[in-house]
């Protein structure tokens, strides 16, 4: 079992009277009340032969044993972030960011949990439907967004991060891009037919030769 993090409350030690001589903590410290742990498993029953975990050093000289059932298990899901253009004007482009649970399809609301969306250095929060919007200048070329989920053990369920990019283009560039996508495979097909025709000597190309 690996300890990933400890969390608790920041405390300031009290002052003692001058006539009391004791070794005390003089700097602010964190009183830990939680441990984030993880164990590697190769299957759902990989720890079936174990029924307890022993921890040493939580309090000096003290050893404690806890059953596995006493540990809170945090499910971790894949997230899915998508970028799309909501509307466009001559001056601005309005982007729509959608964050979903990739396993269930449900929305991820970042307002009530640790984590946020990061778009070109700007932090955004999704709403209850897992959606956030952002307006950028129309002359922007491309935008990248990333979901930073934070520590998975602070909220249930936990999520992994995800990212997406979109190229903000004008309608003319969209048309040229579509033509390019279709032109490449068609050109490769015609080139293959020409090479086969030259190698075999069938003289089938160009097709209007026989007209």
Image (tube, rainbow, N blue to C red):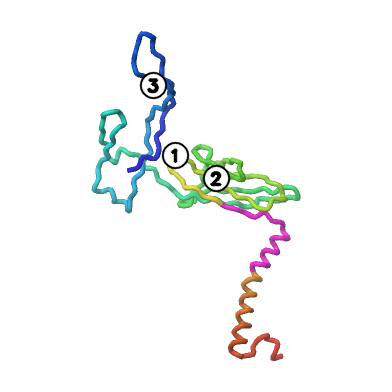
Magenta stretch, main secondary structure class: helix
Decide whether residue 47 is among the magenta residues: no
> Disc 2 marks which residue?
130
How many C-alpha atoms fall within 10 Å of the one at disc 1: few (<14), some, or many (≥20)? some
Residue 186 percent coordinates (x, y) = 64, 74
The structure residue drawn at horizontal position 35% and vertical position 11%, both measured from the top left corner, is 20
Magenta stretch, residue numbers? 164-181
Seen in the picture, residue 92 relative to 9 is either above or below; the reply is below
Q: Quadrant of residue 182?
A: bottom right
Left or right side of 50 for 31: right
Q: Quadrant of residue 152?
A: top left
Residue 68 percent coordinates (x, y) = 29, 41
- Between the C-alphas of marks 2 and 1, the distance is 16 Å
The structure residue drawn at horizontal position 72% and vertical position 56%, both measured from the top left corner, is 170
Residue 164 percent coordinates (x, y) = 57, 52
- Between the C-alphas of marks 3 and 1, the distance is 32 Å
Tell me the quarter of the image containing the C terminus: bottom right
> Disc 3 marks which residue?
25
Nearer-N-terminus badge (2/3): 3
> Disc 1 marks which residue?
155
């Amino acid at each position: 079992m690996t300890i990933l993090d400890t969390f608790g409350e920041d405390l300031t030690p009290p002052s003692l009277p001058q006539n009391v001589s004791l070794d005390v903590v003089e700097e602010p410290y964190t009183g830990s009340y939680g441990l984030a742990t993880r164990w590697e498993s190769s299957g759902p029953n990989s720890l079936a032969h174990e029924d307890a975990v022993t921890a040493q050093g939580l309090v000096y000289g003290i050893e404690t044993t806890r059953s596995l059932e006493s540990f809170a298990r945090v499910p971790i899901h894949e997230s899915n972030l998508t970028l799309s253009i909501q509307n466009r004007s001559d001056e601005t482009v309005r982007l729509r960011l959608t964050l979903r649970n990739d396993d269930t399809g449900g929305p991820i609301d970042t307002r009530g949990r640790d984590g946020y969306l990061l778009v070109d250095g700007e932090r955004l929060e999704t709403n209850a439907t897992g959606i956030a919007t952002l307006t950028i200048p129309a002359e922007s070329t491309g935008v990248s967004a990333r979901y930073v989920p934070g520590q998975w053990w602070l909220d249930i369920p936990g999520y992994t991060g995800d990212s997406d990019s979109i190229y903000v283009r004008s309608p003319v560039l969209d048309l040229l891009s579509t033509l390019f996508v279709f032109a490449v495979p068609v050109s490769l097909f015609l080139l293959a037919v020409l090479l086969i025709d030259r190698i075999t000597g069938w003289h089938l190309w160009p097709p209007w030769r026989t007209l």
